[in-house]
Image (tube, rainbow, N blue to C red):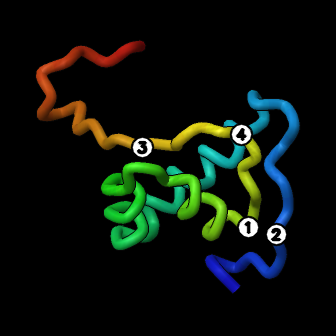
Amino acid sequence: MIHGHQYVSEAPDDFAEFGVITARILALTWFDQAFARKLYDAEDARPLVQASMGVVVRWNFRLKFCYLDWENSGRLPLF
């Protein structure tokens, strides 16, 4: 069992629905610093996302997550 998941399922057919999985991944980074380091350091986070969320990502592309510290970036918020 990985992060409470006992089964594997496919990611949603609709790419827009994949946002729910992305939100769960980001929430997990706030909870687990070791996971966050693995996620942000991965060149392709797809295997980590699949294992931690219990899903299979069927799309043929790499997933890359980057952390931006807004307070120290010198950038204005997008909103």
Lower position in the chain sequence, tag 1 or tag 2: 2
Lower position in the chain sequence, tag 4 or tag 2: 2
Residue 21 vs 68, above or below: the answer is: below
- Circle number at residue 54: 1
Lower position in the chain sequence, tag 1 or tag 3: 1
Q: Position of residue 8 (x, y in %)?
A: 82, 69
Q: Position of residue 61 (x, y in %)?
A: 59, 38
Lower position in the chain sequence, tag 3 or tag 2: 2
Asked if labels 2 and 1 touch by Cβ distance under 8 angstroms, the answer is: yes
Residue 11 vs 74, above or below: the answer is: below
Q: Which residue was labeled with disc 2?
A: 8
What amino acid is at disc 3?
Phe
Label 4 – label 1 distance at C-alpha = 16 Å
Q: Residue at x 46, y 50 (%)?
A: 44
What amino acid is at disc 4?
Trp
Label 1 – label 3 distance at C-alpha = 18 Å
The count of marks equals 4
Q: Which residue was labeled with disc 4?
A: 59
Please name whichever residue, 44 or 36, is drawn nearer the observer in this view of the structure: 44
Q: Quadrant of residue 2?
A: bottom right
Please name whichever residue, 61 or 45, is drawn nearer the observer in this view of the structure: 61
Q: Residues within 10 Å of mark 3 (few under 14, many from 20)?
A: some
What amino acid is at disc 1?
Gly
